[in-house]
Structure formats: C-alpha cells, structure tokens
Amino acid sequence: MGQRRPHRTTTRGLALLATGAMLLTGAACTSQKAASSGGDSGGKIKIGLVTKTDSNPYFVELRESAKAEADKSGAELIALAGKFDGDNDGQVAALENLVQQGVKAILVTPSNSTGILGAIKQARDKGILVIALDTRTDPESAVDATLATDNTEAGRLEGQYVKAALGDRPPAVIMLDGTPGGTVDQQRHDGFLQGIGLAEGAPQILGAEPTNGDQNKAQQAMENLLQRNSSVNAVYNINEPAARGGQAALQARGLTDGVVVGAIDGGCQGVRDVQAGKYAVTVMQFPKKMAEQGVQAGVEFARTGKKLSGFVNTGAVVITDKPVPGVDSKDTAWGLQNCWG
Amino acid sequence: MATKALNRTSVAEFVLRTPAVGPALALLVAIVAFALTTDTFLRLDNLSLVVQQSLVVGTLALGQTLVILTAGIDLANAATAVLGTLLMAKLVLTGAPAPLALLTGLVVAAGIGAATGGIVTSLRLPPFIVTLGTLTIVTAVSRIYADGQSFPVTDGLLGFLGTRQYLFGQVEVTVGMGVALAMFLVLWYALTRTAWGKHVYAVGNDPEAARLSGIHVRRTVLSVYLVAGIVYGIAAWQALGRVPNADPNAFQTGNLDSITAVVLGGTSLFGGRGSVLGTLVGALIVSVLRSGLTQAGIDSLYQDVATGVLVILAVAVDRFSRRRQR
Amino acid sequence: MTREPVLAARKLVKRYGKVTAIDGADFDLLPGEVLAVVGDNGAGKSSLIKALSGALVPDSGQILVDGNPVRFHGPLDARRAGIETVYQDLALAPAQDIASNLFLGRERRRPGLLGRVFRMLDSGGMRAEAERVLGDLGVRVKSMQQPVETLSGGQRQGVAVARAAAFGTRVVIMDEPTAALGVAEAARVLDLIGRIRDRGLPVVLISHNMPHVFEIADRIHVHRLGKRVALVSPRERTMNEVVGLITGALRMGENGQLEEVSTVARTGLTTRP
Ligand SMILES: Nc1ncnc2c1ncn2[C@@H]1O[C@H](COP(=O)(O)OP(=O)(O)OP(=O)(O)O)[C@@H](O)[C@H]1O
Ligand SMILES: [Mg+2]
C-alpha cells in the first residue's frame, strides 16, 4: 500500500546527508572587503589579509588595525577569512582569490602551521610577499617573514607566573586546551608546561580537555574534570573565554580559593576580568602591532621591492594586579590602555 | 501457559509502539557502567551536572523533534538560538529593559521558525535545503550584529534559568531544569493528547494520506516550525542561564548535536515516529557519555567516537524495525 | 429517471501534463442506489472519484450536490458535504493506531473544560466507538491500539471501509474496497454495502470484479479513456456486454442499443488513439 512519493525519497536522501551540512557551509569562505572609499582602486597598492575567522574579536582587531594602517598609507586592504578555526580549505580559497585580484602582499594567520603551505608557495612564486601574522608556519621559511607573539613564550610566562604564585605548594594542574591539532594551542600548552616545570603527562596534571577556546565547552569540561578530582590548585587556559568558563565551574563548586588561574590573550574583556579578580593573570599579545607592521612591510615591498624577513616578535606582557617576584608584569590599568577588542 | 505467549507479544508490541524504551535501556546501561567503573559518577552533584549540561542541546532537540516528526530537519536551530542570545544580551547592554530584550529574542526566534515553515510549505522545498539556507543567513546576521564581540550577561532575568536551588540541601537543581521539564510536559501533552499532535504524526507518516483524511497539511507543518522557533528562543534563554555570555561562535555544532539527541531517542528521521520522551533520554545519553567517559579518564576524542557509534546503531535499529513491519 | 441525482458531474476535465486523466466525464448518482464504476486500468476511475471527493480539483467542469453546483477545494469540503471515500491506497497513517486512523482529521475532544481549554482528546471514547464500528463490519483485530502497519492488507482495507461507512451521511465512495480481500472478507464488504444502501445512503463502488458488480449494483457506469461511455442496468445487460463496453469492442448507439465496433478493435490489436 501507499506508494512512496518522490519528494519523500528525496527528503530521506537529504536527511542522511545532514552531516554534510557543516562541510557545505564550511567550504565557502567569507569575504569582507574593507577597501577604502573611492571607486578607482586600480592604481592603489592592494594588500590581502586572511584571518582564521572574521568573528573572533582578536581577528576583528587585526583586521581593523590593518585597514586603518592601509588607509593611512593609501593602500587598499582586501580582508578575507576562513569560516571557522581550522578551516584550511577556506583559507586556501581565500589565498587563491587574493592572488587573482593582483595583491602585492598577503598577510595571513594560518589556522594550521602546515595546512596552507601549498597555496602560500603558489602566491610567493607569483612574486607576492607573504607574511605570517600571529601564527608561525612550519617550516618558518615557507613565508617571507613572521610577525607574531611567541606563543611558546606566552605560555611559558603563564606557567612561570602560576608557579611563582603557588609558592611552595606542589602544583595540581587542570589544563583547558584549545583546538586539538592547532599550532598556537600546542605552543601555548608546551610553553606553560616548561614555565611551570612539568613534563607532559606528569602526575601533577589532573586532567586536560580541549575547549576550542569556547566558554561553554570550557565550563562543561571543567565541571566534568572536577567531578573526577577536585584537589586542583592551578588552571591553565588557552584563552580568556576558556578561563571564564572554567572559573564559573570552579565558583559553582566553591573552589576558587587558593586556585591560581591563568589565561592568555589580553583582550579588554580579559583584562577587566583580571581587574575584577576573576582570575589572577593574563598574558597580553599585540595584534595591532602585527597588523600595522605587516601592512607597512607590504607597502614598502610594493614601493621599493624590499622584503621583510625572519621572525619578528611582537611581544607578550604579563598583566596582573598581584605581581610575583621573578616575573615582570604590568598592572590592569596599563592593560586596559593597551588591550584589544 | 497461554498468557505467557500473550505477554511476550505484548511486550514486543509495547517496545515497538514506544520507541523510547530502547534508548531508555541504553541510558540505564551507560549509567550502570559508569557507576561501576568510576566512584564519582553516581554522586548526586554529578548527576545534577549531567542534567544541567544537557539543557541547551536538549531544548534545541525538543524543537528538532517536532520538525523531524514531520519528516523534516532543522539545521538552523542552534544558529537561531545563538542569535536569540545575542539579541537578549546586547539589547540589555544597550539599555533596553530585560523583559523586552527577552521577549525580542523569543519573538525573533519564533519569526525565523515561522519564516522557515512558510518557505517549506509554500514553495514545497525540502527542509534540509531551506534550513541550510537559513543556517547560513542567521549565522551571518549574528556575526554582523555581534560585530566581533561577545556580550556578558549581568541582568538577573536573562540569567534567571541558571539560578540554583538545593533540594534537601543535597541535590542541586536550577530553574532551567524546571523550565525544560515544563516544556517537555507541554510538548508531550500536545503531541499525544491533542488532535494537533495526531496531525503532526500523520503528516510525517504519510502526507498524502493525511491530506486525504482532511488534515490541513501545510497549516500543520507551518505550526510545527513556528512552535520549534519558540522552543529555540527558550533554548537561547537556557544558554544564558548556563553561561552568562552571548557569543556568536557558541553552539556551532548545536544543530548536529540536537539531531544526535533526537536520533538516539529513537525518533525516525523519516518522520511520523518518535517521541519527545525519547529525545529527553537521547539528550541525557549524550551528556552521560561525556561526563562518564571524562571521569573514567578517557580522551575526549574517543568520547565522540562512542557517540557516533551510538547514532549509527540508533538509525540502524529504526531502519531494521521499520523493514520488518513492511 | 425523474429523480434528482445526489451527486453529479458534468464535463469534468483533469490533465496531468500530456496525460488527460479525466476527459469531459459525466457522472450521476441517484438516491439510494449502488452505482458500480467499471473500466480498464488507467481508464480514469480513481481520478474521477478523486474529483468527486475533493482530493483533486478539476481543470474544468462542474460538480453538483443535490443539483446545486459546488466547488471542492480539498477533501475536507467534500467530507463536510457528507461524502466519505475509501481511496484506492486507503489513506491511512501506518504508524498510528486503528482508533486514531478511524478518527483522523475529525478527532473528538473531551467534553467540558478539558476539551475546550486544554483541547484534550477523548481517547477512550474514540476507542470504544472504533471498536463498535469495526465490530459491526466484522473486522477482527487484536486491539484498537494496534498500529495500522501491523495489520494484514485485508484488515487495513476493513479499517478504511469502516471509516467511510461510519461517517458518511450523504454518499459513500469506495475505490476497489475488496481488491485485497479473501472470499469471506469480500463478501462481508458487499454485505456492508448492502446495509449502507438499506440505510438510504447511495454508494459508488469501483471494482474490477464483474460477479461482485452484478451481484450488488443497481446501475453500472462504464468508464473508458477518461469518460463515461455507458450507463447500463445489470438486469438488462450481460457481463460479456459490459466487458465489451469496457474494452471498446461494443459501444452505446444513439438509441441506447449496443453496436459492435470494427473487428480490429474487438481483437484488441489496436490500443488507444
Ligand atoms: N497524479 C498523477 N500524475 C500524473 N498522471 C496521473 C496522476 N494520477 C493519475 N494519472 C494518470 O491518469 C490516468 C488515469 O488514472 P486513474 O488512477 O484514474 O485510473 P484508474 O481507472 O483508477 O486505474 P486502476 O483501475 O488501475 O486503478 C492514468 O493514465 C494515470 O497514469
Ligand atoms: Mg484506480
């Protein structure tokens, strides 16, 4: 009975494709043209920017600083982005797109240190200056120059601070990591362990969970880790949203006393959190510097052919209102003047 | 004895007719397994957490259940809820009174639902494609509206569902749990005790038969998407109760997570069979697995493997039981 | 024939792209009669009764109820006019139980506040009523809560027939209601048709089974290539003659006499134009 009707069969097939949805939406990359006003961009120097996403405030800061700098030097900035953190495909498409548009220089924050090397090489073969911002490529020689926070250093500073703040208490650490496989995520994680003086897998590490830097996931991960073992006295966070999520879980269990929580990023919200005592420390990085120096290098290259090269560290500064001996730091007032987002 | 044979068939029938029984058994097995392998899982505070962690995805899944019962699918549900959280939080930060902000979030979510339903019914397009479109649009609108920011929630009303109470000084419950329970009961009642519910099932089961039986198929489908939209709005409120911060990047996999919960709950992706009770169980299975496996010290990537295997099992069971009845 | 038809149609047309399913068909159903509609596969019988029951909207032509022109925009309109239909593919929701199917689209609510405000269904009442209706028809099933998909083909047909019989107030239309039935079950459906007629309700019966048709019908409407080609009485015509009309070997002359069509057509070597 009841013949199958064609449209139901289609729905069935489509329903089974549900998982493909994310892939489909992910495949397209978003584009945001931040060209300065005026119709004749023909004569202007074009500089491309490819960020990991265009929704994270950090990358928004990067984009806006780059645009401001481009405007100042009379260049045109074309800003593109991946769809989500880890969207190598989208970044490759963005790079190809920029090459097509005839840019002189490309600033890129690779989602993955090796994921987009092919597209970078193609661009460089066309004589385009490629500068990695924020995240290094592996090998570093895959790009002309790198302008970045030394993320291992940033992680090490977080670890050193936590170690000093603990004093002689033996560490019992929970680590709220970023995205599995992310370059920056791994560097910060490794740096933290160096700074606090623990080996990977040491028994003092009570647990580590990926959070994708998402407050929601971080809260959930911390809740579950605390169920397993609540004798924590130190928390590593990949970034400030993770720190907020972890902090909320600690607070719900009444565990905030005596727990040293550290974060990395230096977003204004994060600095305010530190000021309010939600967590002890954040390590600030400087996306504005990266963007400005990157655009300047691009304009310079277009005008004179001179290439920026090597690794340029844009610095990392410990922001806290509870300084500890042996770790240089600035207070939150300074932090609020220099924060991003 | 004769009654024995009778009992056996009626038990089999009961299981067939009540698709939530299988998932409930799976949930029980998981709970027992974790109770035996970890000494922390069965603690009351942990169980309370498991429920809290399933609230947002569970609420999204309730709306998703309605849509899937009509043989549709909603890829935009989490994106709709995220836009809801942004509206609520940002409006309050820009000085709007909290009740107005809350209402705006709910109304916009309902509006997105109604628009989706309108497109699905009037243009007769497959819901998969329509909601793929709305997913993309709503996500973009969220990002434009958020402008790279996330918005902390300080107002009491917006975070109200996160309010904690202690029952017997022991069991932590939140207002959000109560809201989720109430929503479940309302939907359960509407689906099983009213003509609307019968029509929803009939439309998903065989739309032509439903039409010939005098059911307003389009009106029913449209109402389902509208109700689902309202549910997503409440999911937004739930989300702010859980995490007092509206972030345009939150719940990126919420749509698939909610489909997972629905499928684990025994509701058929082909429409017309399933229940909100099953979905409740399905949502709990996901968070029981995550919590239990974390406490058993198992890497989170393996937790996803476990969930994936369960999803395939659930769909296979659905397929198999339907084939036998043909 | 001086009596006014209960349900009639004039020059109905329905096209599906290049296929003309109804090609200017006429139709007349008199009060209290059993009218058999016969014709080859694809002759357009189902399409005709779908138009009469509101399930499809004809491109042109007119439908008359008690002599008054009506327009059915959907099955619900026809149902409101008291026309109940057993469709060829039954139109049941397989996953739902018997009682729900019987009352699908016309569910009964509880009396009082529960029904009016909370819209609560009177499930018990509907179940009891379903039990009574099926009992009357002699359809035996285990329980009213059994999903329809667990029933045998014959039982399902029984449920669909019972639904139409129970709710029809002006006309009952049945599209091949005995197709899936065994001898005994078919006999019961014929019996039921007789009882519906005894209640004074006219019945339209589509069937390929000539003995059944000749047993129960008061008149026979012969459908061919999308239109009515003859309207005959089973008492005045033989089965062979009706079969001849169906296949096109015979045709109705101007004066109501049957005449033979060319021999080529009779051997069935030509198909439709
Ligand atoms: N929805 C439709 N779309 C396209 N063509 C249709 C549709 N419904 C019916 N037809 C066509 O209309 C013609 C008449 O079909 P109909 O079902 O009315 O025949 P029938 O006399 O009931 O046949 P049977 O005895 O096999 O049930 C057929 O050629 C059929 O293919
Ligand atoms: Mg037919």
Image (cartoon, coloured by chain):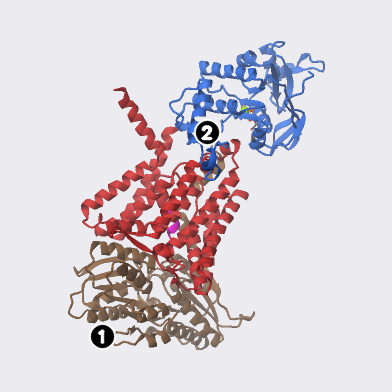
Chain colours: A brown, B red, C blue
A298 lies above or below B89: below
Callout 1 secondary element: loop
Going 59% across and 40% down the picture, which residue do you hit?
B215
Position of residue B1 measured from the top left corner of the image (x, y, whole percent): 28, 22
- Dot in front, 1 or 2: 2
What subunit carries mark 2? C
Residue A31: assigned label:
none
Residue C101: assigned label:
2
Which residue ends up furthest to the front in the rendered image?
C112
Residue A238 vs residue C133, the one in the foreground: C133
Position of residue B34 measured from the top left corner of the image (x, y, whole percent): 25, 52
Looking at the rendered structure, the kind of residue marked 2 is Asn
Q: To which quarter of the image does residue A139 belong?
A: bottom left
Callout 2 secondary element: helix
Question: Residues in magenta?
Answer: B253-258
Q: Which residue is mark 1?
A: A324
Look at the numbered discs 1 and 2 and tell me whether their residues touch, using CB distance below 8 Å.
Answer: no
Give the alpha-carbon distance from disc 1 to disc 2, as whole Å. 76 Å
Looking at the rendered structure, the kind of residue marked 1 is Val
Q: Is residue B2 visible?
A: yes
| Left or right of A340 in this view: B295 | left
Q: For residue B250: magenta?
A: no
